[in-house]
Each structure stands twice: as structure tokens, then as C-alpha cells.
Image (cartoon, rainbow, N blue to C red):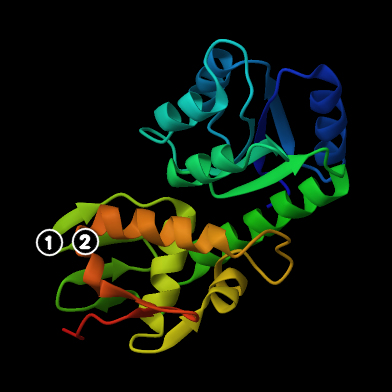
Amino acid sequence: MSDAKILIVDDEQNILDLVSAYLRREGYEVHTATDGVSGLKAVRAFRPDVVVLDIMLPGLDGLEMLSRMRQESDAYVIMLTAKTEEVDKIVGLSMGADDYVTKPFSPHELVARVKAALRRMRGLSAKQSPEILSFRHLRIDVGGRQVWVDGNPIELTTTEFGLLLALAEHRGMVMSREQLLEHVWGHDYYGETRVVDVHIGHIRQKLGVPELIQTVRGVGYRFVDEVD
């Protein structure tokens, strides 16, 4: 996906210039914005595949921008946070961010995260077999990346869909957080395993049937819906 579109939203011009230069060197089309309002406008006009979003923005902050963009975009979101903003990391993930990078960061690391995200997105979109996974409560269209619970459509982000698919494909098996990280974020993921817990909580909330994904204390998670 060398033709992928990347949007960077940050109010520090030096970060915009540096990260843009590194991403353009990889062949990506890059757009930038310096605040949340212009960032939202760019999401609508530019339709990015990946958004690199700073939490601390003037006016409309990054969390509010994320909340609003999730109503109309499933772009992969990497949030930029300061090391002291532990609460913001969790809030950001629970509001729909897919990953986060702490400031100060290496441009090489951020580019690696973007490239890994695009590889995973390409892998999900290319995956066609089996085309449909059907269970008692849940139905997953793998190629179309669509999910229904008891016939009702459910909107999931790219990361949430990847997590649910990984668990459903291993129905009845316990998958550790590390295994889920490798399946969804890739073996080159540098972050913490708690991102899995936050996204699982979000999936449970959206499905409305939390018992479909069981927590196996100290290990990970298990998908338990019956095959239709």
C-alpha cells in the first residue's frame, strides 16, 4: 500500500515536517492539520487510511476529534501521547484509537507502526476464505468486514474486527494477549498488552452479548459462541 493516505494532526510544526518527510520517503500520500477542527475536515476530504493524532490540540482536542471522526471513519488511528498521560492513553483506546506512541518518539518507530498497520489492513481486506463465519449469535463476513449479532449489523473498527475474527477463527481455544497482539497488531508491535483488554471491552460493549468472549484469568480470552 505504497499509495496509502496518511493524515497527521499535530500543532507542533517540527513534528509535522519531520514525520511527513519520513512517510513521504516511503511513498505515502501525506496530509497535515494543526488542530482538531481542520483535522476533521481533512478526514472527510482526504479520506485517510491511517491518522496520526496528537491528544493535545488547540480548540478541539485529539480525544474529541477522535470521538467525532469515529462516527464516519474507520481509519486506523495512532495517537500521540506524553509519557505522563496514562489515563489519556486508555481513554483514547476506549474511544476508538487503535494504537498509541508516546512522545518523544523516534520517527523510525512511528513509520514502522504505520507500515505494520497498513500491512494488517491489506491482509484483512485480502482474506477471503472462509467467506462467512456463522455462529448461533454472530455472523462474520470476512471479505466484506461486516458483523451481525442476531441479525443486527454491528460497526467495528479495523482493529476490533481483526480481534473478533482472530478469536472466532479459534473458537473454543484460549488465546493469550500476546497471541492476539501478534495476530492483529503484528509481531513487530512495540506497545503494551493492555491495548488488547481495552479493545476487547469495546467489542463486548458493541456486540451487546459480552458472554461470547470469555476472560481466562491470567491468560487471555476465548470465543464461545456455538457454530450455526
Q: Residue furthest bottom?
A: 173
Query: Image check: 205 left or right of 101?
Result: left
Q: Position of residue 172 (x, y in %)?
A: 33, 89
Mark 1 lies on residue: 151
Q: From mark 2 to mark 1, how far is it between C-alphas?
A: 5 Å
Query: Image check: 205 left or right of 156?
Result: left
Count of picture labels: 2
Q: Position of residue 73 (x, y in %)?
A: 43, 37
Judged from the image, the secondary structure of the residue bearing numbered disc 2 is: strand
**Disc marking residue 187:** none
Question: Is 13 rendered above or below residue 4?
Answer: above
Find residue 17 and report its image quarter. top right
Q: Residue furthest left?
A: 150
Mark 2 lies on residue: 148
Amino acid on which disc 1 is placed: Gly
Which residue shows up at 27% across the image and 82% down it? 224
Find residue 50 and report its image quarter. top right
Position of the C terminus, as image quadrant, is bottom left
Q: Position of residue 96 (x, y in %)?
A: 45, 43
Query: Image check: 75 left or right of 22?
Result: left
Q: Marks 2 and 1: CB-CB under 8 Å?
A: yes
Which residue shows up at 59% across the image and 65% down it? 193
How packed is label 2: few (under 14 Cα within 10 Å), some, or many (20 or more)? some
Which residue shows up at 55% across the image and 67% down it? 184
Find residue 102 and report its image quarter. top right
In this view, the residue in front, 47 or 149, is 149
How packed is label 1: few (under 14 Cα within 10 Å), some, or many (20 or more)? few
Question: Is 132 rendered above or below residue 201?
Answer: below
Residue 7 visible, this orientation: yes
Amino acid on which disc 2 is placed: Trp
